[in-house]
Image: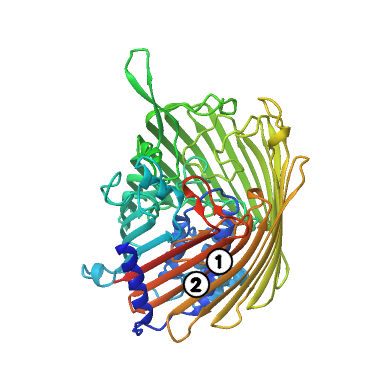
Amino acid sequence: MRLRFGILLFLLLAFTTSSMAQKPKNVQKDAERDLLIEKLVESIAENTEGSIDFTTLFQDLIDFYEAPLNLNSAKREDLDKFRFLTDFQIINWWEYLEKYRPVYSVFELSLIKGFDEEIVRSLMPFITVKPVEEKRKTPFKYYFTRSKNELFIRYGQTMQEARGYALNREDPEKGFLGSPFALFLRYRYRYRDKISIGFTADKDAGEAFFRGTQKQGFDFYSAHLFVRNVSIFKSIAVGDFKAQFGQGLVFWTGLAFGKSAFGTNISRNGVGLNPYTSVNESQFLRGGGVTLNPVKGLDVTLFSSYKMLDGNLSAVEDSLNEADLEISSLPLFGLHRTTTENAKRRKVSEWISGGNASYRYKNFKIGVTAVYTKLGARLNPSEDLYKLYAFRGRELGNVGLHYNYVFKNFSFFGEAAYSSNGGFAVVNGIQGQPVTFLSVSLYHRYFNNRYTAFYSAAISESADRRGEHGFYFGLDCKPSAGISISGYMDVFTFPWLRYQTNAPSSGYDVLGQISFRPARRLDFYFRYRQRMKPRNVSGDLAGGVVKPIEERETGRFRFHVNWLASARWRFQARAEWVRFRKGINTPENGYMAYADASYSSLKKPFTVNARFEVFHTDGFDTRIYAYESDVLYYYGFVPLYDKGVRYYISARYEVFRNIDLWLKVANTSFVGKDRIGSGNAEILGPNRTDLRVQARFKF
């Protein structure tokens, strides 16, 4: 309670203190950045179930926003970090820089094949043009006087009490063991793009804090040291880091772009090693890694990692009567709020060692990735028939070959991989621009039933990337200025049973979008998406033990408008309708509509965003997600279902020159309900109110 009161008092004082801040950043630049990241975040969230941590995915963009990339000193690998661009665009961009540097204006990018006004506008918040400083030895004092230090503190809480906290007061073995607030702490030191040192700590709501099961304080700690470009060492990682190679078929930690309204952007750009600064408790490496650049064009990466994972363990007796351990599953949620969740906490060791060697010559790149994983206990999933081909054992080896080649207006890419349990997988794709106004992509994937890779991020319909065969076609057409037509069609088959699907099956996913920009400050789009995946019959028609399957179709129509009315005001509005059909049952429907307004002061460093939305759905199958403005490094998505209204206000204020504050208060009010949620998360009453406060100190 004292901590909560202190944070709220600090916020109140900050907002009433006279400003001593610098001149605020360009408001137009802020708006363009926010709009791009919003589009990218929504494109991923619509295809991902559960909570998502986007920090690692957009860290490069945020870093470039804070310190824009100078095009006159940019390296080839810097351009790969703009992951919303295609290989074809990145190659053309690099060839232009090599031929025409020094660049005198960012508007020169519009001369590059594959770049138009919209792409250039999207890039502008993250790039700059400046003279290149003469190379000389860096004075030691510069590591202190010209470095950037940031300290983030974030506090969040649901104001209504969930059932889990009341249960714990009645019986310490029941309910949530900790306090209802979430707390995040992060410090990071950076010297240009050469050195990064960071520390992160995170506590989820309901987890104990400096008592009980968490006497060490935060539930999750992370730290890293990362150095770039020292002699032949392209990068050196110590502590927590991430690694991404090829098309993500063999090894890729963290999120990656998948199917989206960016219909042609399906190729991966593995950037190798990078520091880890997020709070996902499983999708990272802990140990050390190095990338060597012994000769021009050749990169050799070696890494090793050891960390503890959550696991559902059970003891068994082997033939020698010695106790052994087996794992039925590896939970990835990272929540340790209850006695049951804590019983799984960090029970299984994971050792990973591997490497990648890649060679780039002009527009051709080829590489090989090899990874060995050893678990501290044998993974032994349940005997359910759909898990017949699932990996069982303690040790797994993966090896893969990836390539990328750009020829004229086309990019060819792919990866083939093998897993030591007899699995095989291959992906191949083509992106191209046959005519100026049209871009297309083709993508084929095949994963046999046994293919297993613990850290895989290849584009697929199934989360485990096993037992799937699919074809994807995407396009992006710009017939005239201000008009864009984009979308994709993906058809896929599953030759074996899947979770909740008791027979081989097939499905499809189709999306089409038409965008209009009648004026520079006004744009809107219409989107329709139709998706069909078979599942087991449920309810009265389910029949006996072996349930038949039925088609489940979801159609979504969306209209969205974005209007930058002035340098101060930005407005958005959206209407979305969902129709869900399950077999021969009566279709379910849902709709959502919101109005959104943002204000940025030109005189004071102050920005505020407010939204009001209404929703009415027939159930969880017709739930609707919408991106929400939030505090920096936090990406808000709330599933809206049943009937009600939601509204929020978020604000940012630069209190002093080196102190920024963010605040968000959101409320969801359900109609006709006396309780919301279920289990330990159940709240009595029809309302849920969430508070989030964040401070950033720069020095």
Depth order, front residue of 233/154: 154
Q: Is residue 656 left or right of residue 632?
A: left
The type of residue carrying mark 2 is Pro
Outermost residue on the bottom side: it is 603
Q: Is the residue marked by circle 1 packed among few (<14), some (14-19), or many (20+) residues within 10 Å?
A: some
Work out whether residue 93 can be spotted.
no
Q: Secondary structure at mark 2?
A: helix
Which sits earlier in the primary sequence, circle 1 or circle 2?
Answer: 1
- In the drawing, what numbered circle is on residue 411? none
Q: Is residue 433 left or right of residue 149?
A: right
Question: Residue at the spot x=25%, y=72% of the render?
Answer: 145
Check if mark 1's residue and mark 2's residue have beta carbons within 8 Å.
Answer: yes
Residue 105 in picture, x, y percent from top left: 51, 77
Residue 614 sits in quarter: bottom right
Residue 496 in picture, x, y percent from top left: 64, 29
Label 1 to label 2: alpha-carbon separation: 10 Å
Depth order, front residue of 255/638: 638
Residue 129 in picture, x, y percent from top left: 46, 75
Residue 319 sits in quarter: top left
Quadrant into which the N terminus falls: bottom left
Residue 620 in picture, x, y percent from top left: 63, 49
Residue located beneath label 2 in the image: 125
Count of numbered badges drawn on the protein: 2
Depth order, front residue of 295/106: 106
Quadrant into which the C terminus falls: bottom left
Q: Nearer the viewer, mark 1 or mark 2?
A: 1
Work out whether residue 255 can be spotted.
yes
The type of residue carrying mark 1 is Leu
Question: Residue at the spot x=36%, y=42% of the render?
Answer: 171
Q: Is residue 541 left or right of residue 677?
A: right
Residue located beneath label 1 in the image: 36
Q: Is the residue marked by circle 2 packed among few (<14), some (14-19), or many (20+) residues within 10 Å?
A: many
